[in-house]
Amino acid sequence: MTTGPGPTHRTPPTAQAGRAAPATIIFSPEQLAEVRRLQSLYPDKRGALLPVLHMAQDTFGHVSLEAETYVASLFALSPAHVHEVVTFYTLFFQQPKGRHVVAVCHNLSCHLAGAQRIIAHCKETLGIDVGETTADGRITLQAVECLCACEHAPMAQVDDRYELDLTPDKVGRLLAGLA
Amino acid sequence: MTEKILTRNFGRADSHTLAVYRETGGYKALDKAAAMQPAAIVEEVKKSNLRGLGGAGFPTGMKWSFIPRGHTGPVYLVVNADEGEPGTFKDRYLLERDPHALIEGMIITARAIRSALGFVYIRGEYVEPWRRFSTAVREAYEAGYLGRGFDIVVHRGAGAYICGEETGLISSLEGLKGWPKLKPPFPAIKGAFGAPTIVNNVETLAHVPHIVNRGAEWFASLGTKTQGGTRIYSVSGRVKRPGIYETSVGITLRQLIYDEAGGVAGNGRLKAVVPGGSSAALLSADEIDVTMDVDGLKNVDSMIGSAGVIVFDETVSIPDALVVVARFYAHESCGQCTPCRESTGWIYKMARRIAEGHGRKEDLDTILDVAKRGAGTTICAFYDGAVGPYISYIEKFRGEFEALIPRA
Ligand SMILES: Cc1cc2nc3c(=O)[nH]c(=O)nc-3n(C[C@H](O)[C@H](O)[C@H](O)COP(=O)(O)O)c2cc1C
Ligand code: SF4
Ligand code: FES
């Protein structure tokens, strides 16, 4: 018995991310084996719901109602239960997201270090508001609460990475580098 | 300067690997603990005066002793690595730079509470810490430290501050939305999956191997009369050297800011300090001669909480800061209790209109009244954690708020 879902857990966003049409909502046989392994780690298999929802999001790009229903079937849970869980957590997207997610922290330490300037610069550069995705499906912009890297304020999470000690210039270069 | 214990290896290359952990004496406490009766380990931790470093400061050994005697079913150990308290970042360092210390602490704790299965709940945003910790767990399995009577499951959260509250965390671990539960029953009696469960913070458990190795007296002597040891202070905001600082819990806030973190940045003059994460009541500049242990902060009606220190210099607008804090609590309330759900939203609205220059004359008193009425009436301590800042920001800097409210 080992740890969480392992290295395959966070696959890079696939073609399904962005605005492309969602593929069929179904896991591969290997993924189904992984689901069963995860479920076996918990005294009640329902404990594996968050890990499997992470898997679903990584595979399908976001957690659609169809994906919720599919995941529910793997746990013998009601789709309503899974929906309630998905909507509770900020890291699950119910709508297609950009190929990249830029989440700028605007909590206290980042606020003191100029988070608002960073957010304004992102909005201006991307031509979108917080919570929106660029028309080409490239970037979703968010303002989020403390990511607990306050010693490097202002900071942001870009996909899996923390980007620290931001300046408008630095964040501009970061945005430009996202394909 | 106190000896560094938790952070002693942070500067070493590859400090997160099993090889380096072993070279520096890692996994030696396991042998010692294996020769001790579970009750003796609990006793040792009690004597060490180790207190929970996640927020509530509860004595760790005493918590462990609440597992019902004679209980024969499963007991779970749950590690709270859902670090989310604004201003706190110490557990991130521990997971990334010394993951084996937590694993060793968990194995010893498991022996003390007779647990065969532990969960480590890591906040979803902490992808790199999760990878590092997962790799360390794999190493520990391969080396045979895990899998012989104790297993660890690493669990990722999905973004929700309230899952840092222990019963919310348990709900989340069980595949539910992260709603806290009414206590009692406390988790030690009925916790994860209905079984007795000990929830401890990452940093709390990382101390355990050292206590076993060097003894309770040694650990107790590092701190104050009522709290042993060192802890890691997260210092951010307007200081010259933001970062983590491990010192005795007997250090004063003034020493921490001026001697450790290099003093006040910005205009160089201190205005106020958040001493223990955003849920701790704000201290004004003349209240910083307090020791940074649980009781030191209690004495000035604040709390040490997660030991996240956020420094405000004189150029910081307190009303603006309150808007940021109030937005956070409005956003993160789980919505289960009426006072919390309604007041956090309402207070955020009032704080915002005051800061934007169209507050009403009665708004300040309304905020104070609403805050005080709701305190202590909710399922979990989240709302009390919001009330601390609401009241202290306004009571200690009332003039600054009033100056923004148009006169009728
Ligand atoms: C709203 C709220 C948020 C909390 N967040 C955390 C957290 O992020 N990490 C943590 O260890 N404890 C957090 N706690 C405290 C936990 O409920 C619990 O007391 C702690 O994990 C116990 O571990 P300890 O005794 O080792 O400190 C929080 C408490 C509340 C009320
Ligand atoms: S106090 Fe707030 S966060 Fe805690 S259970 Fe009630 S509504 Fe949820
Ligand atoms: S306030 Fe931005 S990381 Fe903590």
Image: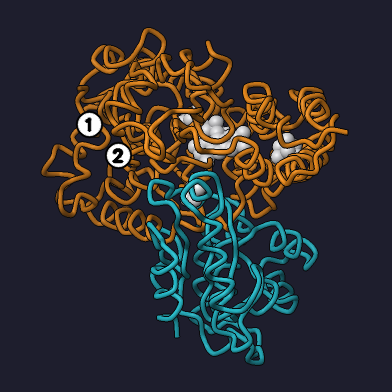
Residue located 78% across and 65% down the image: A78
Q: Which residue is mark 2?
A: B104
**Is A120 displayed left or right of B102 in the figure?**
right
**Is B262 displayed left or right of B170 in the figure?**
left
Looking at the image, is A126 positioned above or below residue A16? above
The reply to whether the C-beta atoms of the residues labelled 2 and 1 are less than 8 Å apart is yes
Q: Which chain is orange?
A: B
Residue B200 visible in image: no
Looking at the image, is B300 positioned above or below residue B345? above
Chain A hue? cyan
Mark 2 vs 1, N-terminal side: 1
Q: CA distance from mark 2 to mark 1?
A: 8 Å
Q: Which residue is mark 1?
A: B29
The quarter of the picture where residue B23 lies is top left
Q: Nearer the viewer, residue B205 or A3?
A: B205
Return the chain for callout 2: B
Looking at the image, is B205 positioned above or below residue B299? below
Position in image of residue B354 (x %, y %): 75, 40
Residue at the top extreme, as displayed: B225
